[in-house]
Amino acid sequence: MPSARALAATPAAAASATVVKLTRVSETRVDRTRYDYVFQVTVQNGSVAQSGITANLTGAGAGTGIVDGRVAVGSLGANESATPADTITLRVDRSLPFDLAGLQWAVAGTPVQVVTFDPALCTAQAGAPGTQTVGLVGTNVMVASADVNASAAGCRVLARGGSAVDAAIAVQAVLGVVEPFASGLAGGSVITLYDAATKKVRTFDGLASAPANIGASTTTSIYQMAVASDLQCRSGQSIGGSISAQQGNTNISGRATGVPGTLKVLDLAHQAYGKKPWGQLWDEAIGLATNGFPMTRYMYSTLYSDGTQFDDETGEPLDAGGVKAWWNTARDRWGAVRCQYKDIKARYCDPSDATGTRPLAVGTLIRNLPLADTMTKVRDGGAAAFYDPNGPIAASILRRFQEDKTRPDGSNNCTSILPATYNADGTTSAAIIPARIPSLMAASDFANYRAVERKPLTGQHFGTTIYTQPAPLFGGVVTLYSLGLLERLGVANQAWATPGFYYLALEASRLANADRRNIVGDPAYSNVNARVAALLSPPYLDARAALVNGRALGTVSAGGTAQGIPAFAATDPATFDPLASRSAPAAATRFASRVTPRSATPLHDGDWNTTSSLAIIDGYGNALAMTTTINTHWGAHIEAAGMMLNNAMSNFSASTPGIDVNGYAANKRPRSSIAPSIALDASGRVRLVWGSAGGGPIPDYIVKTFLGNMVYGMDIQAAINADNWTGQSLGSSVAQVESGKPIVGLIPGMRSTYGYTTTTLGETGLTSGLAGIAVDYDVNGLPVYRGAADYRRAGGANGY
């Protein structure tokens, strides 16, 4: 059934209506020759539906006066006509000729979008997944995500009259089945939402958080012996010592799992914006988990490398063969192959492979009945079923953690032992055993978890207002910072994808990387928001842009108090208001020489997390961008109740407690790079709804898509498909470009022209996971959607 919503638009020629008939109702004599004639007016609308139509008589010819020349017609659908009860009155002098055809009319109305709700109209994007080149065009509803099945499920929800939030729940449910390596119900998510009724943008935070118990009071990172039982994991240590010789071992374990937030944030948004009952949004995902879903090429590549891929943590090339769970940054230590982790092996790897390294073949049907059961419980019991501390889902997760701590006979099962010798040829002195380091999470952590609504981070760039996620996410900060620099540097004067363009983009990202690292963390624990405001202030951006002078920066250092950035100040999380306005930027000061950042280098700050992203516009004009994650590929490599568990705690830094903005603390949320965003034009209309997966470089992918679509006028799919770049690699601010793409051919010339070296500019694997919807407006001001998803993953758009 059709539904209409009015847009603030100026009527154009195509939205036309005309007076086609006058019917005389009465006449009254005024004097000897003059009479008042009352007419009903019939109006025929054109091909565009309109509301608030009025017909105004502007001219009547000699001898005819207009007593009442305005008729309120109301709303008309395309090509409809109406004869309203409202009438006009003309005073006609009968001594003169009177011609109805000579009357002059001005008929005006407001064009309206008429949305048809019909699931049969849902259409998949041509070429998706993998070969799409142009966005899918629609005028009713649109979904874009990292999986074509998820996008189709979301479209069907919208086509039945559901809201953007309803569709997001259905999309997330499917993604948790078909992309278990990237997101799921045991992960964290954030939502940026445009409310068409209020024309406001809201941001919701459901990031995974640290448990209430992190061990001893001296614990400053997940890499330490925190409780007495940890001493059994590795000999020769004491409380506070290293629980493993390599951080990677701890990162891929239960100790790195945060309290999941995805279902809580979806529930919070659904309470405000849901139109369909929660229980009606899960059946497609349950069906896929029950009946089976295919191993995709992308999922296969996360488990087995053909030698052309790159590590999602370090960005370094992967050896051919089974993908290892982790590498250290020196590339001389590594973890077990992913298919040797028992939970991944049991469901996703080939049982006939003697090497124990190969996944199931691409196309193999995979069933996940435990996940189907979990989703059935969530469908029927709501998010409360997941967070019930006495419920079966929380119990399953805690029981799986306990398995890594204690064997059935009561003996110790925790281990973080690595081989004594790693050889250059890739062999080791002993087989690598996956670490088993149990979580400190308790049932009460599920009961106490809360999703948070935060005040959006906003910036005005290139004629738009961009709404994105605030701290503890750094992706939004980097996005606005980079666009602020690029606007000042006149990037639009450079031709797209030329050396001059890439030079500006890379230097902006490198500066953003250096500046954000000591600034962004959970804003409940320090003065993060005041420092971010100073970082994004016009005087500060002016000064940073001045550093980009035609030569590549050698060492990229962070600004500090001398440049107007407030010093770190711890705050009480109990008094923090997430909806309070950002503090005003500190008064600008003279930009002094660059300073060196604090020496407290995080033990793990790669932020090379993988995620999944989605964009939705519903039939009511609401728009939603959401990014959802279990952190690095396959998270903690642990499955419970059919769900892969996150390893988000590996995103905490390790430094001096109380002065590290991203330090580990009870109930705290670690920073991350995700930044789903929405851009509005100067008239307040939605123009771009987008976000990305892909780890630390996520904000660069977001900037790339914005520039391509909004500044250079490219189709959104072409902007997404364009070669990637980043300056967000680890803490080094190295400029990197996407391996295997034309951009690599520009490296020698850029080194020569701009002074990059082999250590400041190189290539790496930059596998983005963009999803977005661009919105144009036709001559009547009505929206035209173009949905697109990254060809690098298994996604696509679906809509009509």
Image (tube, grey):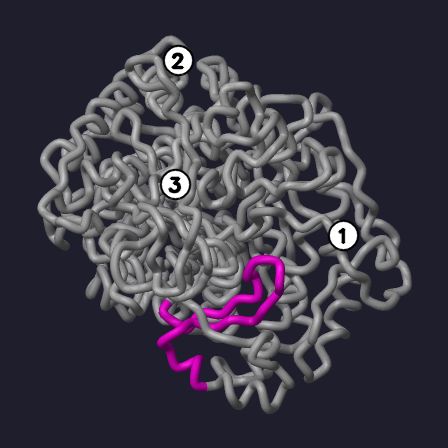
Secondary structure under the numbered disc 3 in the rendered image: loop
Mark earlier in primary sequence (3, 2): 2
Residue with the mark numbered 1: 598
Quarter of the figure with the N terminus = top left
Taking 682 as reference, is 233 left or right? Answer: left
Q: Check disc 3: other Cα within 10 Å, few if <14, some if 14-19, many if 20+.
A: many
Residue where numbered disc 2 is placed: 388
- In the image, 709: left or right of 41? right
**What distance separates the C-alpha of mark 1 from that of mark 3?**
30 Å
Q: Amino acid at mark 2?
A: Asp
Give the SS element for disc 2: loop
Q: Residue at x 34, y 29 (%)?
A: 275
Number of other residues with Cα within 10 Å of mark 1, as a class: few under 14, some 14 to 19, many 20 or more: few
Note whether 315 is above or below 271 in the view shown. Answer: below
Q: Nearer the viewer, residue 75 or 796?
A: 796
Q: Is residue 252 left or right of residue 309?
A: right
Region in magenta: 721-745
Above/below status of 501 relative to 514:
below
Q: Is residue 716 visible?
A: yes
* Residue corresponding to mark 3: 635
Residue 12's image quarter? bottom left
Q: Judge whether residue 623 can be spotted in this image.
A: no
Q: What amino acid is at disc 3?
A: Gly
Task: Tell me the element at label 1.
Answer: loop
Callout 2 crowding tier (Cα within 10 Å): few <14, some 14–19, many ≥20: some
Q: Which residue is pictured at 67% across the width and 22% down the height? A: 217
Residue type pointed to by label 1? Arg
Asked whether residue 650 is drawn in magenta, I would say no
Whether residue 120 is situated above or below residue 169 in the rendered picture = below
- Residue 730, given in percent of the width and then of the height, sits at 57, 58
